[in-house]
Image (cartoon, rainbow, N blue to C red):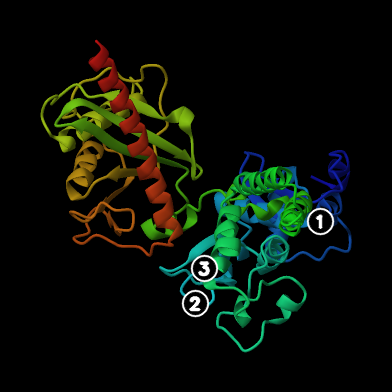
Amino acid sequence: MNLDDIKKLNIPASPGSYQFYKAKGEIIYIGKAANLKSRVMSYWQKSADHAPAKDKMMGEMAKVKWITTDSEIEALLLEANLVKKHQPRYNVLLRDDKRFAYLKISLADEIPSVYITRIIDKSGKYFGPFTSALAVRQTLKAIRKIFPYCAMRKHQPRPCFHYQIGLCLGICGGKISRQEYLKKVIKPLVLFLEGKKKSIIKKLEVRIKKLETENRRQKTDGRNDELMKLKYELANMRQVLDSARVLSVGEKYANDVVELAKLLGLPKAPQRIEGYDIANIFGRSAVGSMAVFSGGEANKNEYRKFKIRIGQGQANDVGMLGEILERRFKHSIASDMPVNPSAPPFKRGVGGLWPLPDLIVVDGGKAQLNAVLRVLKRYKLNISVIGISKGQGLRSAAAPDRLFFPGQAKPLELPLASPALHLIKRVRDEAHRFATAYHRRLRSRRALA
């Protein structure tokens, strides 16, 4: 492409992220800009002094696409999302894990704190990752206007500077209790970052309506100060949201599959992940499920359910898992493809071929993992597999999950905040939810029959 080609695209002069493509459709670079038109055109300016790698990129680039955003901050966050998801070849700097910044909310400190970190451990809640520390700082600055958190981690004789300007409730100087601080700031802040803005706004609206009703009933102005304060909070939150819609980090980030790829030693992030689970009661009404994640996100259109044909009435989850995998892979092998002679006969390619997964996640330990491996071996399929389970008798949400890998004698326990573990658990949980829902429907039908 040349400058004339770029001018014909009518790229908007608004914030956003731009993507450079090769002729065959591969994304080779992702960037962000406060002014998309100006930034993209700058690559073709005569004064542009490109490094050798960028010159090579320009030679390969055949198409430009873009996504507009409402602010420069949102462009930063969108760029981070897309780079992590697609891993473009020329975004080398953005693929260095040491450069990723996270927003952490720590409850382990004397004062529950909110700060930027590049290290993930077992404590606290994490939001991100961000490819730019600037994006985190700008997000925190906007958040503070809604939830006046304290940047101090320990108590001190006097409240901090931010208390003086109304951006801290004064927990650092003993103005409010820890419990009150958690209730007013930290808990709603966590909900906000998880993308639950509507829930927070609704609660404020309910409180305002309740106070208005009480004032009318009691015909008193005794609580008008509190009512005005709540109305101010609501108006302030809406104003910030209108000008910085990027703050709901949970809504903006695709699930992080890059760390998972590195954990497994894969050459690239797995684009299609399939999770499997079995649901039954002592072998009765036995069903299986296949949950599918595409590009790290749940793709419910690809979910499949299986009514178990063998072993009904027998508590044999491993055998049932083998059955649904045999049936699943018949949909991925065309009728003219060679098959292992020892594999059982089946009608192949019915209703179109299902894409093969890059990774399989199965709910269970070594027995379930080996069941998957046996099926893959029989059909000569080279697909990565992970088994995930909790220790015997440890079924609570707080119990650590153990990951089982082929050829590894001992399971791996990742930190609770590990993005790779989060993704694996999401796949496992979706497969479990889907299988359980189907199992319950079957039981209900039989009870009414």
Report x, y in % for residue 146.
70, 60
Nearest-to-viewer mark from 1 and 3: 3
Check the image and name the residue furthest to the left.
314
Question: In the rendered view, would you say 181 is above or below 265?
Answer: below
Whether residue 245 is visible: yes
Tell me how many marks there are.
3
Residue underneath mark 2: 109
Q: Disc 1 and disc 2: Cα gap in Å? A: 37 Å
Report x, y in % for residue 79.
67, 54
Q: Quadrant of residue 278?
A: top left
Which of marks 3 and 1 precedes in the sequence?
Answer: 1
Check the image and name the residue furthest to the bottom.
157
Report x, y in % for residue 76.
70, 57
Pick the front one: 137 or 377: 137
Helix, strand or loop at disc 1? loop
Residue underneath mark 3: 179
Question: In the rendered view, would you say 50 is above or below 278?
Answer: below
Nearest-to-viewer mark from 1 and 2: 2
Residue underneath mark 1: 34
At label 2, which amino acid type do we have? Asp
In which quadrant of the rendered image does the C terminus lie? top left
